[in-house]
């Protein structure tokens, strides 16, 4: 359960406190054991049994606050830290608040936020992805787009944290809403370099929800611009949630790599404390690099509203020329097929 920090504690972070202000501490920790076969390594090819944290969801803690400004307007802020439970190190390149750090205003007119934020792909589309509708997380994060062939694209369902960004999310209009986001490149003499543009349109009413989105990134580091189109939908039928997602990611220069990923699945609430799920992903690529697919199965048992134990199994295969599949993280497979299984414990506060 989220814990309301007392007014005296809020003074430590803010310096000034108001009766209408609140600060909430929240977080998530995930730990487990993962088995992966066909791994390549310095000691030769083989299987591995590893302790890995932040697999289902990344380890994090954060502070989120709000102040009532009157007239229906509110100030909001989020400072979110990502870390590695296994060794205590900071994530996101050692940033203190590498996952999110933004401030903004919200009201009947929508929400306007500024800072380091998730792009709209990462903000909305996990609702339709195998990785987040199951406890699979990184094991179903994305197909590796032929690690042996050098492809670097994936479905980008987790999106990116965008520095120097301004994001607007509209209110709900009869089930419809939209979002827009711009990331400033902050490069002298070049307005567009290292910038990003992002738009989304969503519908959410009753058991059905759907989203379409577009994102363009002008990358100064790799000199390659990327464009992504995404569409997802979900429908609730009794105790079953059916979900699906299509993403198309393209690089506009060089070999003009392109990867289109289709994924979908279903999650069934067998009991209030037990959920079973299955998901399938298929990816096709250009430049004769072939395709890949993955099947993911999971069971999630809730010890409480905040704590669960889960079991995940994944089977991936890459059909590309000289292909080597890779299960979410770790070493590339020594063959075109890889199996991974994980048992984990997750707690949210």
Image: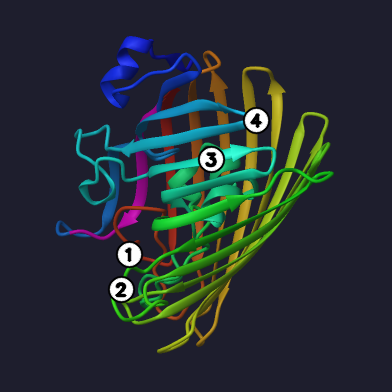
* Image vertical order of residue 265 relative to residue 229, above or below: above
* Image vertical order of residue 241 relative to residue 265, above or below: above
Which structural element holds mark 4? loop
Q: Position of residue 132 (x, y in %)?
A: 55, 42
- Color encoding of the figure: rainbow
Relative depth, front residue between 136 and 37: 136
Q: CA distance from mark 2 to mark 4?
A: 37 Å
Residue positioned 30% across, 41% down in the render: 97
Residue positioned 26% across, 20% down in the render: 12
Give neighbour class at mark 1: few <14, some 14-19, many 20+ (Cα, 10 Å). many
Which structural element holds mark 2? loop
Give neighbour class at mark 2: few <14, some 14-19, many 20+ (Cα, 10 Å). few
Q: Is residue 281 left or right of residue 223?
A: right
Q: Position of residue 84 (x, y in %)?
A: 27, 37
The mark lying in front, picked from 2 and 1, is 2
Relative depth, front residue between 310 and 168: 168
Please name the residue that numbered disc 1 is placed on: 334
Please name the residue that numbered disc 4 is placed on: 72
Please name the residue that numbered disc 3 is placed on: 105
Q: Is residue 131 left or right of residue 17?
A: right
């Amino acid at each position: 359960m989220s814990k309301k920090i007392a007014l005296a504690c809020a003074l430590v972070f803010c310096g000034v406190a108001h009766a209408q202000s609140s600060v909430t501490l929240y977080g998530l920790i995930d730990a487990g054991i993962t088995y992966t076969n066909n791994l390549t390594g310095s000691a030769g090819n083989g299987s591995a049994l590893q302790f890995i944290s932040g697999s289902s969801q990344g380890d994090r803690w954060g502070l989120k606050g709000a102040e009532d400004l009157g007239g229906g307007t509110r100030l909001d802020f989020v400072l979110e830290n990502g870390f590695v439970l296994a060794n205590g190190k900071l994530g996101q390149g050692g940033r203190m608040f590498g996952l999110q750090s933004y401030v903004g205003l919200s009201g009947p007119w929508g929400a306007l936020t500024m800072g380091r934020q998730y792009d709209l792909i990462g903000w909305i589309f996990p609702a339709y992805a195998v990785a987040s509708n199951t406890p699979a997380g990184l094991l179903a994060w994305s197909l590796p787009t032929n690690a042996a062939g050098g492809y670097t694209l994936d479905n980008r369902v987790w999106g990116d944290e965008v520095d120097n960004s301004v994001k607007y999310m509209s209110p709900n209009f009869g089930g419809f809403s939209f979002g827009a986001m711009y990331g400033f490149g902050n490069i002298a003499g070049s307005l567009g370099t290292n910038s990003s543009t992002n738009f989304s349109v969503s519908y959410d009413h009753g058991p059905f929800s759907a989203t379409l989105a577009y994102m363009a990134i002008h990358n100064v580091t790799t000199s390659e611009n990327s464009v992504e189109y995404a569409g997802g939908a979900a429908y609730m039928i009794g105790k079953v949630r059916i979900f699906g997602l299509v993403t198309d990611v393209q690089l506009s220069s060089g070999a003009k790599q392109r990867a289109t990923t289709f994924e979908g699945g279903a999650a069934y609430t067998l009991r209030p404390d037990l959920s079973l799920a299955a998901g399938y992903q298929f990816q096709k690529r250009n430049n004769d690099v072939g395709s890949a697919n993955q099947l993911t199965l999971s069971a999630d048992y809730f010890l409480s509203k905040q704590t669960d134990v889960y079991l995940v199994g994944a089977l991936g295969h890459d059909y590309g020329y000289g292909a080597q599949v890779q299960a979410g993280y770790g070493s590339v497979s020594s063959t075109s097929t890889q199996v991974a299984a994980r048992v984990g414990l997750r707690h949210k506060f």
